[in-house]
Image (spheres, helix red, strand yellow):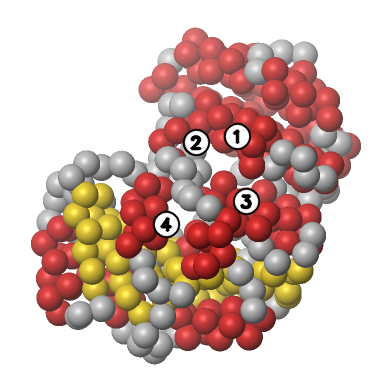
């Protein structure tokens, strides 16, 4: 049986479509665990209505809103299935997602199976834009390859690679063996403290896993929403990414290969760039002095300086190399205006 865990918080606009896509799966031996994370809209009533409609649906109502990561933990604690899948309450599962994911993970005897998805931007405008991601081939990672190759390609880009990492870190792009999750003690952190709740979960699971299967089937539809936690402005974004970096460096990934640490430096540098973009892109709301202060605080971060010194900057595009050289010398105004120029040229 597959346990499908659906955290819900004020999702009444999208919830019926999401749950309908799960209920109508071609593979029927599933349980749907809906974790109502203290919703204040009509979501709890919608959840209860689905539970009355289908006996496979169970609803857990939480009094307080604790966030997506902790809601997933609540769902896993209640799950009875042999496998876990995760669906965000405003996204959709493709009709044969469970059937194909289960066949792949059982056939390969893997601890985790990663599948493809599409991003749907139709919420942004009247011209639906759908992108398939990633363009991957079917592979099986075993032993040290799980961490050194699969997880490394989740953490950040390869040296010389531009664009996105090969594999998305989101929990909803995988099916996991429940026994492996329990044995590894993988848990989701709070995205309020650590920016991303999924990456440490996958890191812990990958350190335990003997096999990871990658399949190129598109099984999930990720709906990009305006103002979501992944697209909106967050004042402490860099600080939250820095806390995640420290936790990964000093606890979760401690003692691993230099290649993993190299990818970890790139992970931090990626978040430095995003931090600069947030400051520059919201200068109007923050004020020019406050935006410069945000940039200064990033430039003066000792871990950022260490990452710049240790990462192979020659592998980066010229614009990024110049940016990080400015950061190394704490050239705050040049960093601001180079970031502005880079944003204008996108």
**Quadrant where the C terminus is found in the figure:** top right
Whole-angstrom CA distance, mark 3 to mark 1, is 11 Å
Q: Position of residue 172 (x, y in %)?
A: 47, 63
Q: Which residue is mark 2?
A: 194
- Describe residue 336's horizontal placement relative to residue 197 as left or right: right
- Describe residue 255's horizontal placement relative to residue 189 as left or right: right
Q: Which residue is mark 4?
A: 224
In contact (CB < 8 Å): disc 3 and disc 1 = no
Whole-angstrom CA distance, mark 2 to mark 1, is 9 Å
Residue pictured at 31% horizontal, 41% vertical: 66
Question: Secondary structure under badge 1?
Answer: helix
Q: Nearer the viewer, residue 167 or 111?
A: 111
Q: Residue furthest front?
A: 183
Q: Is residue 279 above or below residue 313?
A: above
Please tell me which of labels 1 and 4 falls first in the chain: 4
In contact (CB < 8 Å): disc 3 and disc 2 = no
Can you tell which of label 1 and label 4 is closer to the viewer?
A: 1
Q: Nearer the viewer, residue 151 or 294?
A: 151
Please tell me which of labels 4 and 2 falls first in the chain: 2
Whole-angstrom CA distance, mark 4 to mark 2, is 21 Å
Whole-angstrom CA distance, mark 3 to mark 2, is 14 Å
Q: Which residue is mark 1?
A: 247
Q: Position of residue 246 (x, y in %)?
A: 63, 30
- Describe residue 274's horizontal placement relative to residue 18 as left or right: right
Tag shown at residue 160: none
**Quadrant where the N terminus is found in the figure:** bottom left
Q: Is residue 280 above or below residue 111?
A: above
Q: Which residue is mark 3?
A: 203
- Describe residue 275's horizontal placement relative to residue 28 as left or right: right
Can you tell which of label 3 and label 2 is closer to the viewer?
A: 3
């Amino acid at each position: 049986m597959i346990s499908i865990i659906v955290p819900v918080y004020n999702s009444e606009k999208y919830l019926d479509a999401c749950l309908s896509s799960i209920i109508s799966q071609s593979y029927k031996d599933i349980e749907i665990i809906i974790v109502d994370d203290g919703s204040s809209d009509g979501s709890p009533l919608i959840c209860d209505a689905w539970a009355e409609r289908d006996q496979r649906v169970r609803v857990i109502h939480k009094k307080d809103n604790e966030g997506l990561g902790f809601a997933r933990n609540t769902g896993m604690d209640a799950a009875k299935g042999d496998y876990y899948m995760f669906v965000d309450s405003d996204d959709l599962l493709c009709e044969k997602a469970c059937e194909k994911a289960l066949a792949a993970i059982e056939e390969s005897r893997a601890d985790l199976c990663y599948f493809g998805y599409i991003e749907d931007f139709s919420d942004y405008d009247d011209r639906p834009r759908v992108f398939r991601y990633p363009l991957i081939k079917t592979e099986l990672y075993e032993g040290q390859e799980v961490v050194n190759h699969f997880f490394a390609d989740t953490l950040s880009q390869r040296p010389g690679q531009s664009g996105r990492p090969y594999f998305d870190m989101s929990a909803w792009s995988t099916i996991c063996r429940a026994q492996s999750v329990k044995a590894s003690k993988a848990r989701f952190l709070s995205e309020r403290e650590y920016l991303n709740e999924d990456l440490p979960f996958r890191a812990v699971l990958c350190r335990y896993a003997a096999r990871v299967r990658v399949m190129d089937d598109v099984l999930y539809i990720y709906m990009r929403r305006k103002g979501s936690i992944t697209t909106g402005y967050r004042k402490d974004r860099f600080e939250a990414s820095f806390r995640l970096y420290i936790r990964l460096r000093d606890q979760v990934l401690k003692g691993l290969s230099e290649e993993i640490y190299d990818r970890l430096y790139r992970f931090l540098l990626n978040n430095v760039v995003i931090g600069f973009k947030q400051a520059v892109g919201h200068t109007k709301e923050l004020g020019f002095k406050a935006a410069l202060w945000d940039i200064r605080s990033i430039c003066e971060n000792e871990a950022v300086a260490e990452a710049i010194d240790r990462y192979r900057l020659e592998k980066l595009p010229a614009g990024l190399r110049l940016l990080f050289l400015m950061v190394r010398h704490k050239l705050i105004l040049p960093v601001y205006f180079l970031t502005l120029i880079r944003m204008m040229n996108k």
